[in-house]
Amino acid sequence: MSESNATIPFDPVKIGIVSISDRASTGVYEDKGLPALQDWLTKALHNPITFESRLIPDEKDHISATLIELVDAGCSLVLTTGGTGPALRDVTPEATLAVADKEMPGFGEQMRQISLKFVPTAILSRQVAVIRGQSLIINLPGQPKSIAETLEGLKDADGHAVVHGIFAAVPYCVDLIGGPYIETKGEVCKAFRPKTAIRPAR
């Protein structure tokens, strides 16, 4: 079979997932953030994924160090959950911004727009997204249901997008910073790329 007719394999991708919680990290209760992130990503992506998982307390320096560690380990995408509210121990955004080369404010803006469809307290959420090197780091909400809603967006009864989830923009962002070509399953979350950036259909 010629190379042009051969099936092009999906790019492997390494993704860091970080759950940030004092109580879960000390075993007071079971962490639900990491399973929720892993389940959604496995369901949404065609790519073979290697996960780097971390469960850590709400300590700013520890969070920053963990993010740097995951970027240095080759994670093209790092998703955090927890620690983004106004409580005194909520320091995930500050820890994330501390390691940023560039801030990507659109992600946080869109997450709050999605959550406001459900609860008025979404305005208290302080999620941020940044680029460090060739990695995209995004803070997500702490609840599994909210994680899925913000990543996937809102759909009507026919399955058409009413509000786009933030993950629709993630693959092209990763393209632009030199990462692997992330391919989503359209029934879960349809990624958007300009026509010139789309690989030929398989």
Image: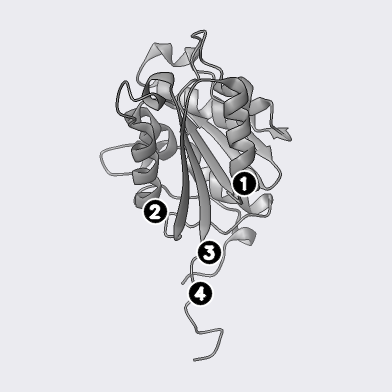
Residue 8 circle label: 4
Helix or strand or loop: what does disc 3 sit on? loop
**Residue tagged 2:** 186
Front residue (pair 135, 159) = 135
Helix or strand or loop: what does disc 2 sit on? loop
Front residue (pair 40, 92) = 92
**Residue tagged 3:** 11
Q: Amino acid at mark 3?
A: Asp
Mark 1 residue crowding within 10 angstroms, few (<14) / some (14–19) / many (20+): some
**Residue tagged 1:** 173
Say if 3 sits above or below 27 in the image. below
Write down the quadrant of residue 39 in the picture: top left
Say if 65 sits above or below 5 in the image. above
The x and y percentages for residue 191 are 49, 50
Write down the quadrant of residue 119 in the picture: top left
**Which residue appears at 39% of the width and 32% of the height?**
147
Q: Amino acid at mark 1?
A: Cys
Residue at far front of view: 26
Mark 3 residue crowding within 10 angstroms, few (<14) / some (14–19) / many (20+): some
